[in-house]
Amino acid sequence: MLLGKTGKRKTGIVLKLSEVWNKVYKSNNSFFGEEPSNFALLCFNHMKTNNVKKVLELGSGHGRDTTFFASNGLEVLDRVAKEKRLPIKPRIYDVKSPLPSLDGYFDAVYSHMLLNMRFSLEELHFIFSEITRVLKPKGLNFFSVRNYNDKSYGTGIEIDKGI
Protein backbone atom coordinates (compact mmCIF):
# COMPACT_ATOMS: atom_id res chain seq x y z
CA MET A 1 0.00 0.00 0.00
CA LEU A 2 1.15 3.49 -0.61
CA LEU A 3 1.31 5.94 2.21
CA GLY A 4 -0.47 8.38 -0.03
CA LYS A 5 0.00 9.38 -3.63
CA THR A 6 2.15 12.40 -2.90
CA GLY A 7 4.81 13.22 -0.40
CA LYS A 8 6.61 16.34 0.62
CA ARG A 9 6.70 19.45 -1.52
CA LYS A 10 9.99 21.17 -2.06
CA THR A 11 10.41 23.98 -4.54
CA GLY A 12 7.29 22.94 -6.45
CA ILE A 13 8.29 19.28 -6.88
CA VAL A 14 5.87 16.67 -5.60
CA LEU A 15 7.38 13.30 -4.73
CA LYS A 16 5.51 10.03 -4.42
CA LEU A 17 6.02 8.75 -0.90
CA SER A 18 6.50 5.25 -2.27
CA GLU A 19 9.49 6.54 -4.26
CA VAL A 20 10.95 8.21 -1.18
CA TRP A 21 10.65 5.09 0.97
CA ASN A 22 11.79 2.75 -1.81
CA LYS A 23 14.99 4.82 -2.04
CA VAL A 24 15.48 4.65 1.74
CA TYR A 25 15.02 0.86 1.86
CA LYS A 26 17.15 0.30 -1.25
CA SER A 27 20.08 2.03 0.45
CA ASN A 28 19.44 0.34 3.81
CA ASN A 29 16.87 -2.45 3.89
CA SER A 30 16.90 -2.55 7.68
CA PHE A 31 16.55 1.21 8.14
CA PHE A 32 14.38 0.78 11.26
CA GLY A 33 15.94 -2.54 12.27
CA GLU A 34 14.69 -6.10 11.92
CA GLU A 35 13.03 -6.42 15.31
CA PRO A 36 9.36 -5.47 15.73
CA SER A 37 8.66 -1.98 17.00
CA ASN A 38 7.78 -1.46 20.66
CA PHE A 39 4.36 -0.34 19.45
CA ALA A 40 3.83 -3.69 17.67
CA LEU A 41 4.77 -5.59 20.83
CA LEU A 42 2.30 -3.56 22.88
CA CYS A 43 -0.47 -3.99 20.31
CA PHE A 44 0.16 -7.71 19.91
CA ASN A 45 -0.56 -8.27 23.60
CA HIS A 46 -3.94 -6.53 23.14
CA MET A 47 -4.56 -8.53 19.97
CA LYS A 48 -3.99 -11.81 21.82
CA THR A 49 -6.23 -10.74 24.70
CA ASN A 50 -9.01 -9.84 22.21
CA ASN A 51 -8.65 -12.99 20.06
CA VAL A 52 -7.59 -11.08 16.93
CA LYS A 53 -6.97 -13.35 13.92
CA LYS A 54 -7.08 -11.09 10.82
CA VAL A 55 -5.10 -7.85 10.71
CA LEU A 56 -4.84 -5.16 8.04
CA GLU A 57 -1.57 -3.26 8.34
CA LEU A 58 -1.42 0.18 6.72
CA GLY A 59 1.96 1.75 5.93
CA SER A 60 4.12 -1.27 6.72
CA GLY A 61 7.48 0.01 5.52
CA HIS A 62 9.81 -2.95 5.09
CA GLY A 63 7.51 -5.22 7.07
CA ARG A 64 9.22 -5.82 10.40
CA ASP A 65 5.95 -5.52 12.35
CA THR A 66 4.01 -7.47 9.72
CA THR A 67 6.55 -10.30 9.88
CA PHE A 68 6.29 -10.32 13.68
CA PHE A 69 2.48 -10.52 13.62
CA ALA A 70 2.46 -13.27 10.98
CA SER A 71 5.19 -15.23 12.77
CA ASN A 72 2.94 -15.23 15.81
CA GLY A 73 -0.07 -16.71 14.06
CA LEU A 74 -1.99 -13.71 12.77
CA GLU A 75 -3.23 -13.51 9.18
CA VAL A 76 -1.94 -10.18 7.88
CA LEU A 77 -2.97 -8.34 4.73
CA ASP A 78 -0.03 -6.16 3.81
CA ARG A 79 2.60 -5.36 1.21
CA VAL A 80 5.67 -7.18 2.59
CA ALA A 81 7.64 -9.81 0.72
CA LYS A 82 6.04 -13.16 -0.10
CA GLU A 83 9.24 -15.17 0.27
CA LYS A 84 8.99 -15.43 4.05
CA ARG A 85 6.16 -17.99 3.59
CA LEU A 86 4.10 -16.52 6.37
CA PRO A 87 0.34 -15.95 6.42
CA ILE A 88 0.78 -12.58 4.71
CA LYS A 89 -1.27 -11.46 1.72
CA PRO A 90 0.73 -8.65 0.09
CA ARG A 91 -1.16 -5.72 -1.45
CA ILE A 92 -0.20 -2.25 -2.65
CA TYR A 93 -2.82 0.47 -2.60
CA ASP A 94 -3.38 4.14 -1.87
CA VAL A 95 -4.91 4.83 1.56
CA LYS A 96 -6.54 7.95 0.08
CA SER A 97 -8.73 5.63 -2.01
CA PRO A 98 -11.26 3.04 -0.82
CA LEU A 99 -9.52 0.07 0.80
CA PRO A 100 -9.86 -3.07 -1.35
CA SER A 101 -11.36 -5.13 1.44
CA LEU A 102 -14.75 -6.45 2.40
CA ASP A 103 -16.88 -4.59 4.90
CA GLY A 104 -16.39 -5.93 8.42
CA TYR A 105 -13.62 -8.35 7.44
CA PHE A 106 -10.77 -7.53 9.85
CA ASP A 107 -10.50 -8.01 13.59
CA ALA A 108 -7.91 -5.22 13.75
CA VAL A 109 -6.23 -2.53 11.69
CA TYR A 110 -2.67 -1.56 12.60
CA SER A 111 -0.64 1.44 11.46
CA HIS A 112 2.58 2.61 13.05
CA MET A 113 3.33 6.27 12.25
CA LEU A 114 1.39 6.25 8.95
CA LEU A 115 -0.97 9.02 10.04
CA ASN A 116 2.00 11.39 10.51
CA MET A 117 2.24 11.66 6.75
CA ARG A 118 0.98 14.71 4.94
CA PHE A 119 -2.78 14.14 4.93
CA SER A 120 -5.42 16.84 4.94
CA LEU A 121 -8.12 16.75 7.60
CA GLU A 122 -10.58 15.52 4.97
CA GLU A 123 -8.18 12.73 3.95
CA LEU A 124 -7.76 11.66 7.57
CA HIS A 125 -11.55 11.56 8.00
CA PHE A 126 -11.76 9.40 4.87
CA ILE A 127 -9.00 7.05 6.06
CA PHE A 128 -10.70 6.58 9.42
CA SER A 129 -14.07 5.98 7.74
CA GLU A 130 -12.48 3.28 5.57
CA ILE A 131 -10.84 1.69 8.62
CA THR A 132 -14.23 1.65 10.33
CA ARG A 133 -15.81 0.09 7.23
CA VAL A 134 -13.35 -2.83 6.99
CA LEU A 135 -13.32 -3.59 10.73
CA LYS A 136 -15.68 -6.14 12.23
CA PRO A 137 -18.12 -4.75 14.80
CA LYS A 138 -16.07 -4.04 17.94
CA GLY A 139 -12.89 -4.37 15.85
CA LEU A 140 -9.71 -2.68 17.06
CA ASN A 141 -7.82 0.17 15.40
CA PHE A 142 -4.22 0.44 16.59
CA PHE A 143 -2.34 3.50 15.39
CA SER A 144 0.59 5.59 16.58
CA VAL A 145 1.36 9.23 15.82
CA ARG A 146 3.93 11.77 16.90
CA ASN A 147 2.94 14.23 19.62
CA TYR A 148 4.37 17.17 21.50
CA ASN A 149 6.08 14.81 23.98
CA ASP A 150 7.92 12.90 21.24
CA LYS A 151 11.70 13.45 21.36
CA SER A 152 11.68 14.12 17.59
CA TYR A 153 8.81 16.61 17.70
CA GLY A 154 9.76 19.93 16.14
CA THR A 155 12.95 18.64 14.52
CA GLY A 156 13.44 18.51 10.79
CA ILE A 157 12.32 20.89 8.07
CA GLU A 158 8.80 22.30 8.21
CA ILE A 159 7.22 21.73 4.80
CA ASP A 160 3.82 23.19 5.67
CA LYS A 161 2.20 24.66 8.75
CA GLY A 162 2.45 21.95 11.44
CA ILE A 163 4.05 19.44 9.05
Image (cartoon, grey):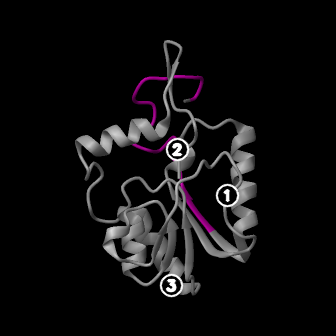
Marks 3 and 2, Cα distance to the nearest angstrom?
Answer: 27 Å
Residue 160 among magenta residues: yes
The location of residue 4, given as percent across then percent down, is: 57, 41
What amino acid is found at the position of numbered circle 1 in the picture? Leu
Pointer 2 residue: 147
Residue at 38 percent across and 61 percent down: it is 63
Above or below residue 85? Residue 78 is above
Pointer 1 residue: 99
Q: Main secondary structure of the magenta part?
A: loop
Of the two numbered discs 1 and 3 in the rendering, the one whose residue sits closer to the viewer: 1
Of the two numbered discs 3 and 2 in the rendering, the one whose residue sits closer to the viewer: 3
> What residue occupies the far top of the structure in this picture?
11
Lower sequence index among marks 1 and 2 = 1
What amino acid is found at the position of numbered circle 2 in the picture? Asn
The location of residue 116, given as percent across then percent down, is: 54, 43
- Which region is colored magenta? 141-162
Above or below residue 51? Residue 25 is above
Q: Is residue 69 visible?
A: yes
Residue at 67 percent across and 58 percent down: it is 99
